[in-house]
Amino acid sequence: MDSEPSNGSHVRFVGAVAGVGSGLTKVAVGHGFDTIKTRLQCSPPGTYKGAVECMLRIVRNESVFALYKGATPPAVAWAAIDSVLLGSLHNYRLFLIRHGMTESVPGSDARRLTVAGHTIAGLFAGLTSAILATPMEHLKVKLQMQSQRLVSDRQYRGPVDAIRQIVRSRGVPGLWSGFTGSLAFRSNFAWLFGSYEIYMRGFARLQGTPYEISTPTANFLSGGFGAFAFWIMAIPADNVKNRMMATPHTDVQQSFLAVVRGIHAAEGFKGYFRGLGPCFLRAFPVNASALWVYEGLMRLLGAEKTRH
């Protein structure tokens, strides 16, 4: 694997540029599923019988456009957040390569980052992105949980009004409510990017066989399948994070451990897995599309190689 730029130092930040395209893709493809997931996670137990009933009630009582409540914050911020996530991922990978966390490519003299290296880079990229992602997700959850049909009946008229009320009540740090939950949730990007590399290597072994597929197709499938590993591991922390963020800004904010104990006391172990169904429905198309866009832009922009 090449560890030096192939066409100049200007490629250093192309991971961030590619992250912009990835973030916008995720909002367009998956926000409706995310709204259903958030309602299932943060509503009192028994409010909905399942994801389908939740969707039908939202559409019937609030209109089909209600599935996109809270879409403005991610539409504005996801590009920046995925820019930070994927840009830092690229640079963490380069850092680990240059500090020897490599292995030989079978049948070649080239070197590549180990699977453990890809996993560690994903972990730290996720933690880095939490700084920017937390206030966006906080606003998104607050807006998604408003079930009133008319804007005039809602506590928050929109994201700007939500920011104004939260800051007035709890100061600017109040926008980062749920930060510990966000760190726990985003640490699971280790599983996404570690499993993504494993799938990419599996597809690479098909080269020269009747089942060989193109690199973009491998990117798409690896991103989709890797998302399943991510959500299986991340859904408990996602439940905790979203319930922390859904707490009214006028109430006492609960700690991460307090929410963990509250979920277990009220619902048992299964309470940590609320919303997993919509996550699975959303996971493949959203992440497959996002990583297909990201990897395609990385190739187009001539980025330094971090995988062989």
Image (tube, rainbow, N blue to C red):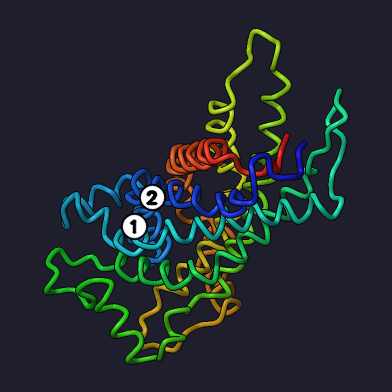
Residue 153 vertical placement versus 172 (above, below): above
Drawn side of residue 31 relative to residue 180, left or right = left
At x 35%, y 53%, the residue is 36
Q: Can you see residue 50? A: no
At x 49%, y 51%, the residue is 17
Secondary structure of the residue carrying tag 2 is: helix
Drawn side of residue 101 relative to residue 205, left or right = right
Sort mark 1 into few (<14), some (14-19) or many (20+) by Cα contacts within 10 Å: some
Secondary structure of the residue carrying tag 1 is: helix
Q: Whole-Å distance between the Cαs marked 2 and 1?
A: 7 Å
Drawn side of residue 67 relative to residue 74, left or right = left
Q: Which residue is mark 1?
A: 75
- The N terminus: image quadrant: top right
Q: Which residue is mark 2?
A: 24
Name the image quarter holding residue 180: bottom right
Question: Tag 1 or tag 2, which sits nearer the N-term?
Answer: 2
